[in-house]
């Protein structure tokens, strides 16, 4: 049996989980999330835990078993605590700001890069060189943070660019002076 799939998912106080016709709905203080699971997998709410099972021992069914359990656990955590990804901008004159439903990033191009903020996410810039992406959906938070980082990934010589908070950038040595000939 799947090691991940057989773990039960505890439902915290203030979170409601409903399973109906192949769809899992999770509602909590931070928001709502829903997920349509595969027919090879069963999801049941037993008391204050969610139990994920599978119909057969086929390889693909075992994979769906662990995947479904992880996705439901992420939804439960997301509506209870939420997810956050922080980015930092390093470089002279590089900055970001939120304008309405768009994130405007100025990172050394001749024009500012405007990224529309997806529905369900909250993006804030506590200062011009920090970006915080918050939301209920783990995948959506990570995907938008990756799209922002992709605008100007950190370069290896000076380290300028957009990086995740705490990300280590391997620095390279620049050109070495050849000296006297």
Image (tube, grey):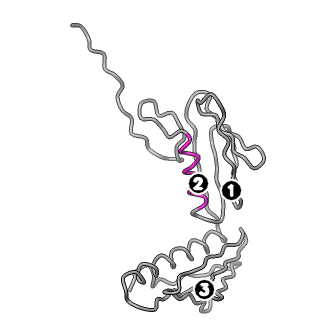
At x 69%, y 44%, the residue is 103
Crowding around mark 1 (Cα neighbors within 10 Å: few <14, some 14 to 19, many 20+) is: few
Q: Which residue is mark 3?
A: 22
Q: Which residues are magenta?
A: 140-151
Q: Tell me if 100 is positioned left or right of 156 in this view.
A: right
Observer-nearest of 46 and 137: 137
Mark nearer the N terminus (3 vs 1): 3
Q: Tell me if 147 is positioned left or right of 180 in this view.
A: right
How many angstroms separate mark 2 from mark 1 (CA)? 15 Å
How many angstroms separate mark 3 from mark 2 (CA)? 31 Å
Residue 137: x and y, percent? 62, 65
How many angstroms separate mark 3 from mark 1 (CA)? 26 Å
Q: On the image, which quarter does residue 66 sit in? A: bottom left
Residue 23: x and y, percent? 63, 82
Mark nearer the N terminus (3 vs 2): 3
For numbered disc 1, what is the local secondary structure?
loop
Would you say the residues marked 3 and 2 are in contact, meaning their CB atoms lie under 8 Å apart? no
Quarter the N terminus occupies: bottom left
Observer-nearest of 5 and 40: 40
Task: Work out whether 82 lies above or below 145.
Answer: below
Quarter the C terminus occupies: top left
Q: Which mark is residue 17?
A: none
Q: Tell me if 7 is positioned left or right of 80 in this view.
A: left
14 part of magenta stretch = no
Q: Which residue is mark 2?
A: 85
């Amino acid at each position: 049996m799947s090691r991940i799939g057989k773990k039960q998912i505890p439902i915290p106080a203030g979170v409601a989980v409903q399973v109906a016709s192949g769809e899992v709905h999770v509602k909590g203080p931070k928001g709502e999330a829903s997920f349509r699971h595969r027919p090879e997998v069963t999801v049941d709410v037993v008391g204050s835990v969610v139990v994920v099972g599978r119909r057969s021992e086929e390889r693909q069914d075992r994979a769906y078993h662990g995947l479904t359990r992880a996705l439901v656990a992420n939804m439960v955590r997301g509506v209870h605590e939420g997810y956050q990804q922080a980015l930092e901008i390093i470089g002279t004159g590089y900055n970001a700001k939120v304008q309405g439903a768009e994130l405007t990033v100025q990172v050394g191009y001749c024009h500012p890069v405007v990224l529309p903020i997806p529905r369900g996410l909250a993006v804030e810039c506590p200062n011009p060189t920090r970006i915080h992406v918050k939301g209920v959906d783990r995948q959506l938070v990570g995907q938008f943070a990756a799209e922002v980082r992709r605008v100007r990934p950190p370069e290896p010589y000076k380290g300028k660019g957009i990086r995740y908070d705490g990300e280590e950038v391997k620095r390279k040595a620049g050109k070495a002076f050849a000296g006297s000939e």
